[in-house]
């Protein structure tokens, strides 16, 4: 099948890699130098909907898979569907589950999904009141999309007030921060659960655990994600069952009740408390990055068939099959990340991994310079490998990490080492 993937990051590289390995002819718009090893890259601006539609038509693709949230929230899936394409990605209306925290929190509340108590605020007076009534330990969130930076986890009322003020009065995040959510801060351990969804049914993907802080031991500022592991040892069958019943089943019923067309990935960020209750922190309406990287190494089915079936609204009446081995993904980030990202540092060592299968280097922020690759973004590479169990998978991945170099390279040594107990 001819498939067009929209996007250019590590997640899209992983999707293209899996689809290519499944024998499909893959195109990527715009793609990247890394993606070009498994797909044909098409130049273009993913914000230009007519141009994307034209590319899909001229290539004669049978399926379009949309990677990032920004084009989804802007309605790219709607305009491609209106032109007759099969699209894996939700409508703009359904993408509000990620595009507006206020929309999504109201959705969770309306449909009985466990979520932290919250207030919507547009003024500092309202925010002060919300912070006081929740006792100061709160999380302040910009309502709109903020490139993963719009959430401030606070320990004191003062911290919360200054985060709220920056968003509401000082224009941090511009219009995305004109409304904020102030919510109760939950304690527990986080896990990412993604589900393929055809609008009526869903199929859960293997759970993955992200490591968001930049430094070992979960210290330092949050990033887009410094590494992931799948499966997650502490996630029991019972927890998965509760997430199905209390989060995903209710979500699917809610989407249908609200008339929202969701054909894409529902990615739940869950906080599991000491009693094993999965609290829904947020939904993303796309594959996670870097959760997708280990998950793509473990899928033992034809991903293209599943994505097309979701796009057409009738998922196979079967279960996805999984490689039982453990996949670990370690992100190599550039100097300055997450505050900034130094570009143009030469990357060495990549040529050693010419025939990847159990060890794949996904490119996120790199570009070609002559015959070599150089850094070109915050998260540069996602080194991802499979092994029998966590220890072997980690050994394989870190042995590869140790052979790659660029000036200022940052990565965590402790991906997968949080232990097996859940809180
Ligand atoms: P979100 O974009 O809503 O997932 O938030 C980003 C990160 O902020 C999450 O992965 C959590 O680490 C943290 N977070 C969000 N909401 C809460 C909450 N209510 N309690 C504790 N931590 C949270
Ligand atoms: N790994 C976090 C995200 O994709 O938003």
Image (cartoon, rainbow, N blue to C red):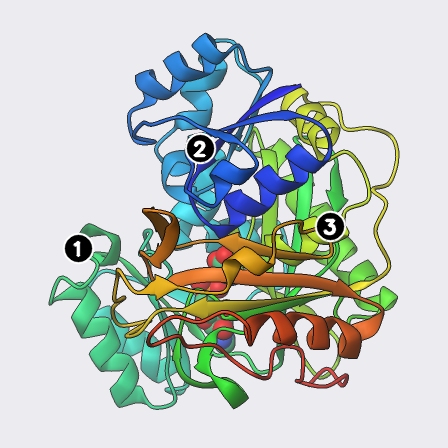
Q: Quadrant of residue 403?
A: bottom right
What's the distance in space between the residues labelled 2 and 3, CA to CA? 24 Å
Q: Earlier in the sequence, mark 1 or mark 2?
A: 2
What's the distance in space between the residues labelled 1 and 2, CA to CA? 22 Å
Q: Nearer the viewer, residue 133 or 410?
A: 410
Q: Is residue 339 left or right of residue 221?
A: left
Q: Nearer the viewer, mark 3 or mark 1?
A: 3
Q: Secondary structure at mark 1?
A: helix
Quadrant containing the C terminus in the rendered view: bottom right
Q: Earlier in the sequence, mark 2 or mark 3?
A: 2
The verdict on label 3 being within 8 Å of ligand 2 is no
- Identify the residue at the far left of this view: 170
Task: Say if residue 190 shows up in the picture.
Answer: no
- 133 vs 18: above or below: below
Packing grade of label 2 (10 A; few <14, some 14-19, many >=20) is: some
Marking on residue 123:
none
Residue annotated with mark 2: 93
Q: Earlier in the sequence, mark 3 or mark 1?
A: 1
Q: Secondary structure at mark 2?
A: helix
Residue annotated with mark 3: 205
**Residue drawn at 56 percent across, 28 percent down:** 261
- Residue 264 lies, in percent from the top left, at 59, 36
Residue annotated with mark 1: 174
- Residue 32 lies, in percent from the top left, at 41, 41
- Residue 5 lies, in percent from the top left, at 51, 31
Q: Secondary structure at mark 3?
A: loop
Q: Nearer the viewer, residue 26 or 103?
A: 26
Task: Say if residue 157 shows up in the picture.
Answer: yes
Q: Is residue 180 left or right of residue 363?
A: left
What's the distance in space between the residues labelled 3 and 1, CA to CA? 35 Å
Q: Nearer the viewer, mark 2 or mark 3?
A: 3
**Residue drawn at 65 percent across, 70 percent down:** 397
């Amino acid at each position: 099948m001819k498939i067009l993937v929209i996007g250019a990051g590590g997640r899209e590289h992983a999707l293209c890699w899996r689809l290519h390995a499944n024998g499909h002819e893959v195109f990527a718009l715009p793609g990247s130098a890394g993606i070009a090893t498994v797909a044909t890259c098409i130049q273009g601006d993913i914000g230009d909907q007519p141009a994307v539609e034209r590319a899909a038509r001229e290539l004669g693709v049978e399926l379009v898979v949309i990677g990032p949230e920004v084009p989804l929230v802007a309605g790219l899936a709607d305009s491609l569907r209106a032109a007759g394409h099969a699209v894996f990605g939700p409508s703009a209306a359904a993408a509000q589950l990620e595009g507006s925290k206020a929309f999504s929190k109201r959705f969770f509340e309306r449909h009985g999904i466990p979520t932290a108590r919250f207030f919507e605020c547009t003024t500092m007076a309202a925010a002060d009141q919300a912070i006081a009534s929740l006792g100061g330990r709160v999380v302040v969130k910009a309502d709109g999309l903020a490139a993963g930076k719009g959430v401030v986890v606070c320990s004191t009322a003062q911290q919360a007030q200054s985060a709220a003020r920056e968003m509401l009065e000082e224009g941090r995040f511009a219009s995305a921060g004109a409304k904020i959510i102030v919510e109760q801060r939950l304690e527990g351990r986080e896990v990412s659960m993604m589900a393929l969804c055809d609008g009526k049914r869903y199929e859960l993907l293997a759970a993955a655990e992200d490591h968001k802080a930049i430094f070992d031991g979960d210290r330092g500022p949050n990033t887009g994600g410094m590494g992931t592991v799948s499966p997650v040892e502490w996630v029991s069958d019972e927890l998965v069952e509760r997430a199905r019943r209390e989060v995903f089943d209710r979500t699917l019923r809610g989407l249908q009740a609200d008339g929202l067309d969701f054909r894409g990935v529902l990615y739940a960020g869950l906080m599991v408390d000491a009693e094993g209750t999965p609290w829904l922190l947020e939904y993303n309406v796309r594959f996670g990055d870097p959760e997708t990287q280990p998950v793509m190494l473990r899928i033992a089915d034809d991903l293209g068939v599943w994505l097309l079936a979701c796009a057409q609204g009738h998922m196979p009446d079967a279960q996805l099959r999984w490689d039982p081995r453990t996949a670990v993904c370690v992100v190599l980030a550039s100097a300055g990340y997450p505050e900034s990202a130094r570009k143009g540092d030469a990357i060495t060592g990549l040529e050693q991994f010419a025939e990847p299968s159990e060890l794949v280097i996904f490119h996120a922020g790199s570009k070609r310079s002559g015959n070599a690759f150089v850094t070109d973004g915050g998260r540069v590479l996602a080194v991802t490998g499979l092994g029998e169990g966590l220890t072997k998978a980690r050994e394989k991945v870190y042995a590869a990490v140790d052979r790659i170099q660029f000036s200022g390279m940052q990565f965590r040594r402790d991906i997968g080492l949080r232990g097996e107990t859940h809180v």
